[in-house]
Image: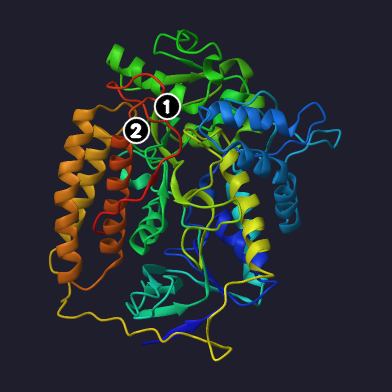
């Protein structure tokens, strides 16, 4: 079996992964693995922008307070203040990569506002901010000689010291990976592994996430024994375009920030009866309100109304959204925009510090797959890319000067021997329909039973079926040779069960976790899953 050595192994190619790699390249050899192309990630689909206090009328304290309020006061205030205050450095990192953020005619920053924010503090590059940031980072990564990029490479499992027969503290030494192009399985050996794999939106039937969002990092870390936190808080973006051909296309929150109002099919504003902030309320409130109106009226969707802004403004400010809507026969200047909520972002994940440190030595986590305490029970709009930028920088600052080292014997560093990947009696799969059927069943039951509004009965049904499904998946995994679809299904099922188990433990309604059985908030705090189940 081939073994590739590096100093830093980064899994994932979104903003958290690529920015981590760029910072770490100054300290040693970096290998970046991504299971599709570099640009196939959530960052590339981000429309709105990146939070950063830059206006003299705004302050870090105001941004921190908005973040805590949106997160239903479950965030870690120290973490919130630290990340908010480091945001300007992250913005500068992107500018250094060549990102050109929007400016006003006088040269000042053209900051916008989104739901839950008390001021204009969103840096943007039109309505394709993520795409422009991703392209700029990719160009830099491609030029960096100390970064080895491995596309179409999916991680099977982390290499843990106890699993390879080493005593002492259990720590991570890289991972076994599958080359999707050739089918080869090999090891990437590193004393420092950084998971930046994004979220798990594909665990739900309806999501605005790309197909790559299968919760790989959280599942890998869980199987390795890492602590997982707050997985019950899955954010549903309130305004996904409702059209049969509009797969996972978002209508950015910036549209509401610039004056769009949520209305029913008769054009009546309904948000004020749910929250005094109206259409600019935080995402959890808006998503529940839309869901409630759809159930009350029996309608398939609600609508956004931004017609008062006029065509010239809309084409200039939201060119991508405007033209995409026109492709489906919707003119934002004259028509209401049909929208529905869709799974969007995981506020929980691998418990980590702002500098990426997890409960396992040699393993770091950055970005959406990590739970730092920033988001609490609900993420404030555009705080995600800010967190990825800041935590990538702080993780590199921690690992760069003082990286994890190889094992030491006789005072000398020794690379551990990595056992050859064993296939045992596994044979090539002959019934791929089983994988697709289980994939569909998980996503549908999660949508039906563990969605925007939950109950004890629905969660219990989901838990029972998931337990059976994971047993069937485990049997399939060991019986047949691994394939990308099998690995993603395995990870998806782990994340689904983590979400359900976490939701069952929280006996209150807070932020994104709303249950009819416990409609009020209690004194619950962050909860960490410590009682592992068989992975």
SS at circle 2: loop
| In the foreground, 500 or 344 | 500
| Residue at 34% over, 84% down | 419
Q: Is residue 454 above or below residue 293?
A: below
Q: Is residue 343 above or below residue 535?
A: above
Q: Position of residue 323 (x, y in %)?
A: 53, 36
Question: What is the quadrant of residue 306 in the picture?
Answer: top right
For label 1, the residue is 510
- Graded by Cα atoms within 10 Å as few (under 14), some (14 to 19) or many (20 or more), the crowding at tag 2 reads many
Q: Which quarter of the rendered picture does the C terminus lie within? A: bottom left
| In the foreground, 441 or 430 | 441
User: Residue 227 vs residue 479: left or right?
Assistant: right
Instruction: Indicate which disc residue 134 carries.
Output: none
Cβ–Cβ under 8 Å for marks 2 and 1: yes
For label 2, the residue is 506
Question: What is the quadrant of residue 222 in the picture?
Answer: bottom left
Q: Is residue 233 above or below residue 510?
A: below
User: Residue 532 vs residue 10: left or right?
Assistant: left
| In the foreground, 106 or 291 | 291
SS at circle 1: loop
Q: Position of residue 83 (x, y in %)?
A: 65, 44
Which residue is situated farthest in the bottom direction here?
A: 410
Q: CA distance from mark 2 to mark 1?
A: 9 Å
| Residue at 51% over, 46% down | 45
């Amino acid at each position: 079996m081939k073994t590739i050595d590096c100093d830093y192994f980064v899994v994932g190619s979104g903003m958290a992964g690529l920015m981590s790699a760029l910072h770490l390249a100054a300290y040693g050899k970096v290998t970046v693995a991504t299971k599709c192309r570099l640009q196939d990630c959530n960052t590339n689909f981000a429309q709105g922008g990146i939070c950063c206090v830059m206006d003299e009328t705004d302050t870090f304290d105001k941004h921190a307070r908005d973040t805590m309020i949106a997160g239903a006061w479950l965030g870690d205030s120290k973490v919130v203040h630290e990340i908010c205050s480091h945001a300007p450095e992250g913005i500068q990192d992107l500018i250094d990569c060549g990102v050109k953020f929007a400016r006003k005619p006088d040269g000042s920053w053209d900051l916008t506002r989104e739901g839950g924010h008390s001021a204009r503090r969103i840096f943007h590059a039109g309505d394709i901010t993520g795409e422009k940031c991703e392209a700029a980072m990719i160009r830099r990564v491609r030029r960096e000689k100390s970064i080895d990029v491995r596309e179409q490479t999916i991680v099977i499992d982390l290499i843990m010291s106890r699993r390879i027969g080493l005593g002492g503290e259990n720590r991570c030494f890289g991972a076994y990976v599958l080359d999707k192009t050739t089918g080869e399985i090999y090891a990437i050996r590193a004393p420092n592994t950084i998971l930046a794999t994004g979220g798990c939106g594909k665990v739900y039937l309806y999501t605005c996430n790309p197909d790559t969002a299968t919760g790989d990092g959280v599942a890998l870390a869980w199987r390795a024994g890492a602590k997982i936190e707050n997985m019950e808080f899955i954010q549903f973006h309130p305004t996904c375009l409702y059209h049969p051909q509009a797969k996972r296309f978002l209508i950015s929150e910036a549209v509401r920030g610039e004056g769009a109002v949520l209305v029913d099919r008769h054009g009546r504003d309904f948000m004020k009866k749910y929250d005094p902030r109206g259409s600019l309320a935080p995402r959890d409130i808006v998503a529940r309100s839309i869901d409630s109106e759809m159930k009350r009226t029996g309608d398939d969707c609600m609508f956004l109304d931004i017609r008062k802004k006029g065509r010239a403004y809309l084409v200039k400010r939201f060119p991508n959204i405007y033209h995409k809507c026109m492709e489906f026969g919707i003119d934002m200047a004259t028509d209401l925009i049909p929208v529905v909520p869709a799974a969007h972002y995981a506020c929980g994940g691998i418990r980590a510090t702002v500098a990426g440190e997890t409960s396992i030595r040699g393993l770091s986590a950055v970005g959406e797959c990590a739970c730092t305490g920033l988001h609490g029970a609900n993420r404030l709009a555009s705080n995600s890319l800010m967190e990825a930028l800041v935590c990538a920088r702080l993780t590199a600052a921690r690992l760069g000067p003082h990286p994890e080292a190889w094992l030491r014997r006789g005072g000398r560093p020794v690379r551990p021997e990595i056992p050859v990947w064993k296939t045992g009696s596994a044979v090539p799969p002959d019934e791929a329909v089983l994988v697709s059927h289980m994939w569909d069943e998980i996503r549908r039951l999660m949508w039906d039973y563990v969605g925007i509004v939950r109950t004890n009965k629905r969660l219990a049904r989901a838990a029972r079926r998931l337990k059976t499904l994971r047993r069937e998946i485990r049997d399939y995994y060991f019986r047949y040779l691994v394939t990308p679809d099998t690995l993603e299904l395995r990870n998806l099922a782990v994340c689904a069960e983590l979400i359900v188990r976490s939701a069952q433990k929280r006996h209150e309604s807070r932020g994104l976790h709303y249950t009819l059985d416990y409609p009020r908030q209690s004194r619950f705090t962050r909860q960490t899953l410590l009682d592992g189940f068989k992975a």
